[in-house]
Amino acid sequence: MAPARMFSFSSVGQPLYSASPMAGHGGHRSHGFFHPSPVICPGREPTSHELFNDLDFQEGLTSVQALLRQHPKSNREVLATVDHLKRLCIDHYFQDEIDNVVDSCVDLIHSGDLQDATLSMRLMREAGYSVSADEVLQKFANGNDDFNLAHSKHIRGLLSLQDMSHLNVGEASLFKAREFSSKQLRIAIKYLEPNLARYVKHSLDHPYHVSLMQYKAMHHLSYL
């Protein structure tokens, strides 16, 4: 299922306003989440509608900043919010707040929940932290150092594991992570509800870390 919507803006600039609707909304554009920012030309006074959109955008920024500052920093919810912002390519508006959240991710790295551990590790690596994948992933392996099949039904955890595997710097555990998550997700696709199945297939065919920013923003936005 799509993650719960946790924030809303009425306007953003490129590249988001050119996003076309995808199958997740049955071919209809989602209203009330993102709308194009008006272009203000030199020598032309902005209209009241344009000024309202700009004010609404600033209010949206302020509300998300407050959310990132006030939430418990070890909470999965705030990490998921950071992940949404990064995937939508608007994280630069909240860099100070995101830095503070990432600084507090270390406790979730030791979580026994696959999604929590892998999401926190990925955010830390993206921020430049040196984190051992072997140490993070060993708790999810069996006696043969293979991933425990008990995790094969945790779709969100597998998606997070797949994303993290693309930050591999030669670690055997991340090679295994990619193989395991890819295999289990492809097996699961035919059993998932259609919208989630499309999201999983798209994520496997077009990995987040090797996709163009505008393309990945369009993909993620269509499923929020």
Image (cartoon, helix red, strand yellow):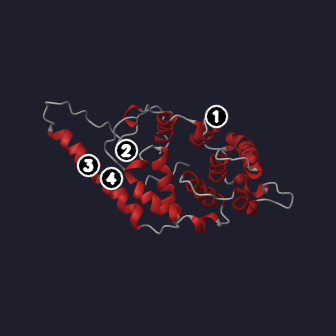
Within 10 Å of the Cα at label 2, are there few (<14), some (14-19), or many (20+) other Cα atoms?
Answer: some
Q: Which numbered marker is on residue 61?
A: 4
Q: Is residue 218 left or right of residue 32?
A: right
Query: Which comes before the other along the chain, label 4 or label 2?
Result: 2
Q: Label 2, on which residue?
A: 33
Q: Looking at the picture, does residue 112 appear above or below residue 214?
A: below
Q: Position of residue 52 (x, y in %)?
A: 20, 45
Q: Earlier in the sequence, mark 3 or mark 1?
A: 3
Q: Is residue 151 left or right of residue 32?
A: right
Residue at 45% x, 49% y: name it.
Answer: 85
First in sequence: mark 3 vs mark 4: 3
How would you rate the neighbour count of disc 3 (Cα within 10 Å): few for under 14, some for 14-19, many for 20 or more? Answer: some
Check contact, mark 2 vs mark 1: CB within 8 A.
no
Query: Mark 3 is on which residue type?
Result: Asp
The image quarter containing residue 199 is top right
Badge number at residue 56 = 3
Residue contact between numbered discs 2 and 3, judged by CB atoms under 8 Å:
no
Which label belongs to residue 224? Answer: none
Q: Which residue is mark 1?
A: 205
Q: Amino acid at mark 2?
A: Phe
Mark nearer the N terminus (2 vs 3): 2
